Amino acid sequence: MTFKLVLVFLLGLFFTYVLLLPKKVLLRKSFILAFISLMIVFSFNPDWSTKIANYFGVVRGADFLFYLSHLVLFFIAFVYYLKFKEMEQRFARLVRHLAISEAKCPEDHDIS
């Protein structure tokens, strides 16, 4: 029972933190809040997760939640990888633009 209370308390803190984030990414924020809410519900009713897991062919609810959380983490990592690649491409375009603009006007720069 103690672990359940600690888990619900930590999930509640995380839920509150996400609520206080800026609203510019409402879809992402809603997804996170729904996921945290689902975890809180499953903390109070672990049999529900077992029933859902059995429907999907997984024996235990804890295993199902473990697999589900890993899928979510892989999705988040993939999204950040795509953002990083986009930022890397933007940075390369900026460096190319600066290199070309400095190469056109060498007299403006003192090379001493």
Image: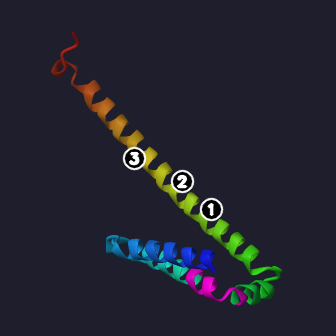
> What is the x, y in percent for residue 91?
39, 42
x 16%, y 22%: residue: 108
Q: Indicate the quadrant containing the N terminus: top left, top right, bottom left or bottom right.
A: bottom right
> What is the x, y in percent for residue 80?
51, 57
Which label is found at residue 81?
Answer: 2
Q: Nearer the viewer, residue 110 or 68?
A: 68
Q: Are marks 2 and 1 in contact (CB under 8 Å)?
A: no
Q: Residues within 10 Å of mark 1 (few under 14, many from 20)?
A: few
x 48%, y 50%: residue: 84
Q: Are marks 2 and 3 in contact (CB under 8 Å)?
A: no
Tag 1 secondary structure: helix
Q: Amino acid at mark 2?
A: Tyr
Residue denoted by label 1: 74
Residue found farthest to the top: 112
Query: Magenta stretch: residue 40 in it?
Result: yes
Q: CA distance from mark 2 to mark 1?
A: 10 Å
**Who comes first in sequence, dot 3 or dot 1?**
1
Query: Magenta stretch: residue 69 in it?
Result: no
**Who comes first in sequence, dot 2 or dot 1?**
1
Q: Which residues are magenta?
A: 39-47
**Who comes first in sequence, dot 2 or dot 3?**
2
